[in-house]
Image (cartoon, coloured by chain):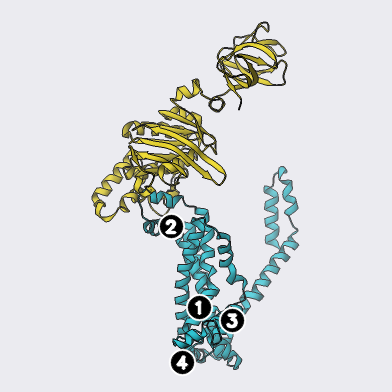
Amino acid sequence: MDIGIHNVTKRFGAFAALDNVDLEVRSGELVALLGPSGSGKTTLLRIIAGLEWPEQGRILFGGEDASERSVRERNVGFVFQHYALFRHLSVFENVAFGLRVRPRASRLRESELRERVERLLDLIQLRSIADRYPSQLSGGQRQRVALARALAIEPRVLLLDEPFGALDAKVRKELRRWLRNLHDNIHVTSVFVTHDQEEALEVADRVVVMDEGRIEQIGAPQDVYEEPATAFVHAFIGESIIIPVTVEKGAVLHAGKPTSLGAPDVQTGPARLFIRPYDVGIGMPVNAALQGTVQRLHGIGAARRVEILLADSDQTIEVDVPRAHEVTAGQRVGIVPLRYRVFADG
Amino acid sequence: MALANTILQRRNARAGPHEDGDEVRREPAAVRFLIVALAVAFLVVFLVLPLITVFQQAFMHGLWPYLAALVEPDAVAAIRLTLVVAAISVSLNLLFGLVAAWAIAKFDFPGKSVLITLIDLPFSVSPVIAGLVFVLLFGAQGYFGAFLQAHDIQILFALPGLVLATVFVTFPFVARELIPLMQEQGTQDEEAAISLGASGLQTFFRVTLPNVKWALLYGVLLCNARAMGEFGAVSVVSGHIRGETNTMPLHIEILYNEYQFTAAFAVASLLALLALVTLIAKVLLERRAAAE
């Protein structure tokens, strides 16, 4: 079931949680909504579910307008950040809940219901603890029960709100790999919200990067990292060195001096230069794009972290330099960005 | 003293060098003994002694006068009336409290804070005033007095008046227990239930109600204790007709004023027993709730 989101706007008082958002989720796809808190990603997920209503815009399920349908009628599986398991019901009854509340006419026979629930408990590998109560489960187990409960109603769409947010780092890694495998097996169209870029890039087919109620970029995990469309995406995903510059007729100036870097597509005016810390060559000061003085070296591993104070400014940048490369503190160096991007301010 | 000293020594033995900040709280044993003794003395004088006195007075002339006071027709009528009034008021307040708490905790609407304040009103208003309000409304000279007389409806000096006064006074108990718990639990469970296809009623009975059942029982328990013991408001609207509109507290007062101490305390002992049962039930409830 593909999902269409058209011109969706949602305000909370004067604050625009979502500002004219358009998004197509293809059938069977696993999409991540990634952004900092307050970026509107959870609001968008809740609007898709029908738990929240947009001021403007439409939600289409399989080309059919779902905007007027309540959450009850949309047949979505929603997994809450804090699981929202029913504490007075056992694991089995939690998973069975959606089947038990069906209208009498479509209710399953007890034997069919047991069969379906047990199959789901096998899927989440928790059949052995079907009689336990939520308070007796670990965080990871609770999350899997919440997932099985959402899947029990055979949803057309699976929506997950920060599914791993409340788990510790190790469990989180295991569980997201497990979710990816699960999705590869059952192919239900899924959207999950996260503020963790690593999680989004590892699990999702496509990543939707959001900020301040707007979509900044939609793309494959590699694309949003390697081809960031906006300054926000570059800064938000992965590490970035960010240097304020000015652009004049396609040439980049730092502290008023020419840098030999070009930005032909950027209009004249204040801008920012974005470089990944490992995309920097260190060489002789002469003819380098930028100059600076090495302040400190630290770090273990293949590359050393070098702190460089830029000439003609009080900004210190951190670059990764291969261990074999000779650098010493106090040395004046030239900085040559191997790959960079320039985004106009504003 | 010896015990206090041992505890002090043990604490000293356990305290590491970096726990010096604890030193401030370490009172001399004598001071601590004094504080504990004061607290215990206070408890005995204000809570235990009165309770013992009630039973002592009730059984002063032996078991037979005690039982006679309880089976006397006016006493039986008072006990029955108290049970009826409490049963109706508690049921009504169970319903009102649940609905009010549900509305306040699960929804946002204008005037919500006003509603919360209004729920607390019966706690801050003297019960006598509560009773007088109903006299002003339903009395012969009251707003609805002429209408009620014309249609031959008796509210004051009858069961409806007693129930109204009791409902008013005991209104906050159930709602007050539920509101903080429901607010803490939020609406995620309900949202989960609805997204799984449950209707509003199914969500309420299968999710919301089970989530608050212990707090609800606790509120009902307190509400019931207060309903049976209410004096002020009921006294104003009752009319004190013996065998007809006297509840237990009113009956006790009349007996007491007529110097029938044994009979007064015999009936009083029933109310005291109710208090004890309430306390025990409260402890059991808290244990059950904690166990879940």
Which type of secondary structure does the marked residue at label 3 adopt?
helix
**Residue B273 visible, this angle:** no
Which comes before the other along the chain, label 3 or label 4?
Answer: 4
Q: Position of residue B95 (x, y in %)?
A: 45, 68
Q: Nearer the viewer, residue B24 or B244?
A: B244
Give the colour of chain A.
Answer: yellow
Chain bearing mark 4: B
Q: Is residue B168 left or right of residue A66?
A: right
Cα distance in 3D space between marks 3 and 2: 37 Å
Front one among B120 and A321: B120
- Give the number of the disc on residue B208: 2
Residue A158 in the figure: left or right of residue A237? left
Disc 2 residue type? Thr
Disc 1 packing (10 Å; few <14; some 14–19; many ≥20): many
Task: Give the number of the disc on residue B73.
Answer: 4
The image position of residue B115, as x and y in percent, is 55, 64
What residue would you read off at disc 3? B132
Q: CA distance from mark 1 to mark 3?
A: 12 Å
How far apart, in angstroms, are the residues tagged by discs 4 and 1? Answer: 25 Å
